[in-house]
Image (cartoon, rainbow, N blue to C red):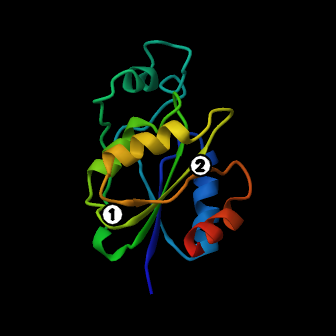
Amino acid sequence: MSKTLVAYFSASGVTARAAKEIADAVGADLYEIAPAQLYTAEDLDWTDKKSRSTVEMNDPGCRPEIAGTVGDMDRYDTVFVGFPVWWYVEPRIVDTFLESYDFTGKTMIPFATSGGSGIGGAQKSMKEHCPGAVWKEGRLVNSGAAAWAKQAVEG
């Protein structure tokens, strides 16, 4: 039987709720991609060109530090990766996560929450970070996360 992990980054709690719903639906382990330095409300002010999130997203090479690690990534065959869409792609801390492990041959399934942007730009970017992974089509999961997750794992 394959083992599934739901790894997620959540700045405001919305993506965390979706990740927990997905993990419960598919019987997966849950891992929070937690920043070593937590984001404040000021850090997340995308209208401020000097805010931490804006500075990070304007630097494609930025890799914010993650607070912890996944215990034994080798035991997972399938990894859901969740995040809020920032500037039409995944936040840079998700890139840190993707570049921290070897996902070659693993099934990767992205999911995102968003107030209006799609997941297409993030899917393209994430595939570039992990070209050896087997990528399934991702989805925005502002609602219906559990039903979609079951279908993504089975199909």
Please identify the quarter of the rendering in which residue 108 is found. Answer: bottom left
Residue sitting at the far right? 143
Please identify the quarter of the rendering in which residue 114 is found. Answer: top right
Tell me residue 116's x, y (percent). Answer: 68, 32
First along the sequence among labels 2 and 1 = 2
Would residue 135 appear left or right of 129 to someone viewing this image? right
Q: CA distance from mark 2 to mark 1?
A: 19 Å
- Residue at image coords 27%, 58%: 101
CA neighbours of label 1 inside 10 A, class few (<14), some (14 to 19), many (20+): some
Q: Does residue 22 sit above or below 92 in this rendering?
A: below
Viewer-nearest residue: 120 or 1: 120
Tell me residue 40's x, y (percent). Answer: 49, 30
Would residue 42 appear left or right of 139 to someone viewing this image? left
Tell me residue 130's x, y (percent). Answer: 32, 51
Q: Label 2 is placed on what type of residue?
A: Thr
**Marking on residue 70:** 1
Would residue 131 appear left or right of 46 to someone viewing this image? left
Q: For the C terminus, which image quadrant?
A: bottom right
Q: Label 1 is placed on what type of residue?
A: Val
CA neighbours of label 2 inside 10 A, class few (<14), some (14 to 19), many (20+): many
Tell me residue 26's x, y (percent). Answer: 59, 74
- Residue at image coords 54%, 40%: 120
Residue 90 appears in the rendering = yes
Report which residue position mark 2 lands on. 15
Viewer-nearest residue: 59 or 65: 59
Q: How many numbered marks appear?
A: 2
Q: Does residue 136 sit above or below 92 in this rendering?
A: below
Residue 72 appears in the rendering = no
Secondary structure category for the residue under label 1: loop
**Marking on residue 46:** none
